[in-house]
Amino acid sequence: MLIAQQKQKENIVEYLLYMYQIEDLVRSLHCDFPTIQSKLIPSVLPNPSYRLAYEGWYAQICEELLRTGKQQRGHLYELEEIFTELALLHRTLLEVLKDEKYTALAEQAQKSIEEYAHKSSLLNAHPVEICLHAMYMKLQLKLRKQSISDETEKAMDPLRALLAYLSREYKNMKSGLWGVNLN
């Protein structure tokens, strides 16, 4: 919970990827709050004074996944909202502001986005969704200590750069600094 709060303030893409992990972790425990309460929370609790806050946070995640029928797949409403904001920001940077740096990053990422979309059956997905999916799959491979080829690493670099720029612009937008040159 504390990690999520920090990531949400600092880097929205890292926050989304972290929360995707939390969703998967909760799902792996079948959204069963008593199991989460007895097995998961003690292992992630930074100190006992946070127990009630952590229990409330995980209970809320379980309840929403169950209520919305997302025990197998899909994302929490808040994460869907953030994704929608990122997709709109992506479009705004490209089509409204015609941000040259972002446009160049998007062009550099295009081939990797298309290749990943094809390999992952995400042909109709938004480019930002494809990038997030690719980064999450890479994270999963690393957590499982599976190797990632140099070719795959190289293909991920433009996706990572695009998401980093988008995340920075999102933070600026949310903090009221949007349009201020922070380079």
Image (tube, helix red, strand yellow):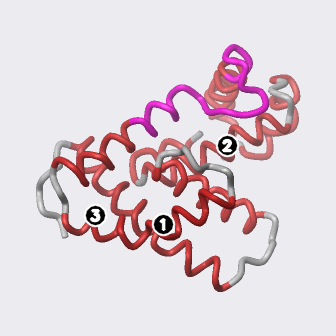
The x and y percentages for residue 87 are 39, 43
Q: Where, quadrant-wise, is the N terminus in this rendering?
A: top right
Circle on res. 47: 2
Q: Which residue is drawn at 58% across and 50% down?
A: 123
Give left or right: position of 162 versus 78: left
Are dots 3 and 2 in contact, CB under 8 Å? no
Q: What residue type is labelled 2?
A: Asn
Question: SS class of the residue under badge 3?
Answer: helix
Q: Residues within 10 Å of mark 3 (few under 14, many from 20)?
A: many
Task: Tell which circle, 3 or 1, labels the residue nearer the N-terminal end.
Answer: 3
Give left or right: position of 108 versus 136: left
Task: Tell which circle, 1 or 2, labels the residue nearer the N-terminal end.
Answer: 2
Compute the Cα span from label 3 to label 2: 42 Å
Q: What range of the chain is rendered magenta?
A: 65-84
Q: Nearer the viewer, mark 1 or mark 2?
A: 1
Q: Dot 1 corresponds to which residue?
A: 159
